[in-house]
Image (cartoon, grey):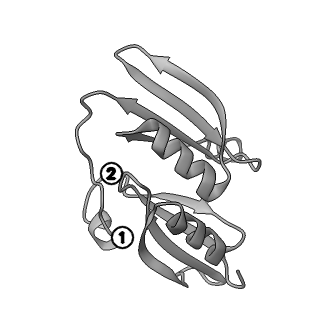
Amino acid sequence: MSDEIRPHHVGLTVEDLDRARDWYMAAFGFAPAMTFELPGGARGVMLRTTGGAGVELFEVAGAADGMAWADPPAALRRRGFGHVALEVGDLDAAFAAAVDGGGAPVWDPRQSPEPGRRMAFVHDPEGNLVELIGPQDG
């Protein structure tokens, strides 16, 4: 059964749906797969890459603040989800695009604990922690 299970998407509640959507599209090449409204006043958009990665963004009036603006060590000290990780082909280019598009640098590109890989962290415009993972040579 485990070979039938694979990641589908990650969901993030944001304050400004349009701003978050535009950033994920510009920084990483996501495209809208569908927009929707849910009972209770939630607006949402599912974003996908051509490779199938998905980020679902929700805007809900009155949503409480979460763990925004944490760095990786602070996120590790909280139970629950701490960050979103995106696989990228060129880590340096993805990091630059994320920051140039309005994200905030957290950790510049560096060696990952995983052999042959590099990583970086940024905050999206809402303060969500996003890890970028790329090959050693990119």
Q: Is 53 placed left or right of 103 in the picture?
A: right
Quadrant into which the C terminus falls = bottom right
| Residue type, label 1 | Pro
Instruction: Give the distance between the C-alpha atoms of the residues marked 2 and 1, in whole angstroms.
Output: 13 Å
Residue that appears at 43% across and 78% down:
107
- Which mark, residue 135? none
**Percent x, y of residue 47:** 61, 40
Kindly indicate whether the residue at mark 1 contacts the one at mark 2 (C-beta within 8 angstroms).
Answer: no
Residue that appears at 60% across and 58% down:
27
The quarter of the picture where residue 92 lies is bottom right
Residue that appears at 27% across and 68% down:
74
Q: Can you say whether 104 is above or below 14 in the image?
A: below
Q: Nearer the viewer, mark 2 or mark 1?
A: 1
Q: Nearer the viewer, residue 82 or 71?
A: 71
Which residue was labeled with disc 1?
72
Residue that appears at 53% across and 51% down:
23
Quadrant into which the N terminus falls = top right
The quarter of the picture where residue 135 lies is bottom right
Question: Which comes before the other along the chain, label 2 or label 1?
Answer: 1
| Residue type, label 2 | Gly
**Percent x, y of residue 34:** 63, 27
Q: Secondary structure at mark 2?
A: loop
Which residue was labeled with disc 2?
80
Q: Can you say whether 48 is above or below 41 in the image?
A: below
